[in-house]
Image: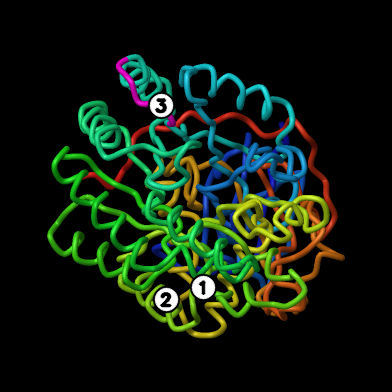
Amino acid sequence: MAGRTLIRGGLVITASDEIHADVLIEDGRIAALATSGSATAEAWTAERTIDATGKYVIPGGVDAHTHMELPFGGTAASDTFETGTRAAAWGGTTTIIDFAVQSVGKSLRDGLDTWNAKADGNCAIDYAFHMIVSDVNPDTLKEMDLLVEEGVTSFKQFMAYPGVFYSDDGQILRAMQRSAENGGLIMMHAENGIAIDVLVEQALARGETDPRYHGEVRKALLEAEATHRAIKLAQVAGAPLYVVHVSAQEAVAELARARDEGLNVFGETCPQYLFLSTDNLAEPDFEGAKYVCSTPLRPKDHQAALWRGLRTNDLQVVSTDHCPFCFEGQKELGRGDFSKIPNGLPGVENRMDLLHQAVVDGHISRRRWIEIACATPARMFGLYPKKGTIAPGADADVVIYDPHAEQTVSAATHHMNVDYSAYEGKRLTGRVETVLSRGELVIDQREFAGRAGHGRYTPRSTCQYLQ
């Protein structure tokens, strides 16, 4: 364990405060903060001192939606827990919550054990798991109670992907009823997969095979319909609901209406929906395949509703849904049939920088940046105040961020194990300089100083927003 570390002279930004303060770290945790230049701060000594003058000192990011090593569509996500968590650290994220998968016919425990084995000893940063529930039955429902007790407190279900992850309304209702009793949080992929499959079949029959048709068949109205239905099922069950990767303005409207009614309903969006659009899906020569994900990219006019939702707190979290597939050999599986393109984008390394650009562009404030990327995901999934803030007693997951550095995003310089960047050529202001995870240097002045196996599995408490 590192000894005492002192971070001097930076602007400490949390979800609630901005203060020029020195930060004292001891035994892997934040020991104290004191106003820079004060007698208290000046009296501190440490084995390591980091000069943060002119920089931001922010909590490490919490990415509550990643898919490392996920089998999908006859292939698997190209980032391992080792490469993916290293890339996350480069991007200022110090905790990921990945998804363990229950296979149909198998137990939740089997799925969780499989994902624990994938991650154990391989992560550069701390990690936790949600549980994908693919097979609701009496045994599964009992297992949900046991998982909540041991710190896996959220369960994802899919209204999409019939024959793979899909749950029908009855299965969803049963799982929601169980979560209402055990304190768990249901996370919902809200798209009407049954209707989408009909539209896919019809599009292919018309010879519409290019990547752009992926977006055209996964209609915004079918996201809104499924979001509405999920909200009503949760209301019937008396359960909280978290809707993942919201992309359509019509779905935001459903969430806003439910929250105005006082329901425990929450929404997440992702950088790809804030910065990319159907224009990318329509790129020629099959380049659009790089941008195939579900929910799909929408026309640009949906972006304003997403930014507004983040400002009004109708959307609370920005996660990545990081699920990378290489263009060569993986995305190419769908040449001639868009429905065979593996769904997912790389982004775990880009989230904090893209959201800082949103601060620069005036979409959100600095504190809201930290709120949607660090504090709220930590609270939503039972990790706060251990994660997501800079306060005495919190884990010393700290990022020194240079708000003035300029960078150009490129696959040539990123650290994700994927052969393209979804944001290739995008110029950003702001860059991670140094990252500490539990007081240990992971990124040191733009050099990787971490190691596989430093990251610890982190059990979680239940959602901290439930009324």
> What sort of colour scheme is used for the picture?
rainbow
For numbered disc 3, what is the local secondary structure? loop
For numbered disc 1, what is the local secondary structure? helix
Tell me which residue sits at (69%, 67%) in the image.
422
Q: Position of residue 455 (x, y in %)?
A: 67, 34
- Provide the residue designation for mark 1: 274
- Provide the residue designation for mark 3: 135
Task: Say what amino acid the circle numbered 3 marks.
Answer: Asp
Q: Position of residue 135 (x, y in %)?
A: 41, 26
Report how far apart the C-alphas of labels 3 and 1 lie in the structure. Answer: 33 Å
Report how far apart the C-alphas of labels 2 and 3 lie in the structure. Answer: 35 Å
Indicate which disc, 2 or 3, sits on the residue closer to the N terminus: 3
- Provide the residue designation for mark 2: 307
* Residue toward you, 319 or 166: 166
- The part of the image, by quadrant, that contains residue 345 is bottom right
* Residue toward you, 331 or 152: 331
What residue range appears in magenta? 134-138
* Residue toward you, 271 or 419: 419
How would you classify the magenta stretch by its main secondary structure? loop
Q: Position of residue 394 (x, y in %)?
A: 50, 42
Residue 271 visible (yes or no) = no
Tell me which residue sits at (69%, 44%) in the image.
77
Check if mark 1's residue and mark 2's residue have beta carbons within 8 Å. Answer: yes
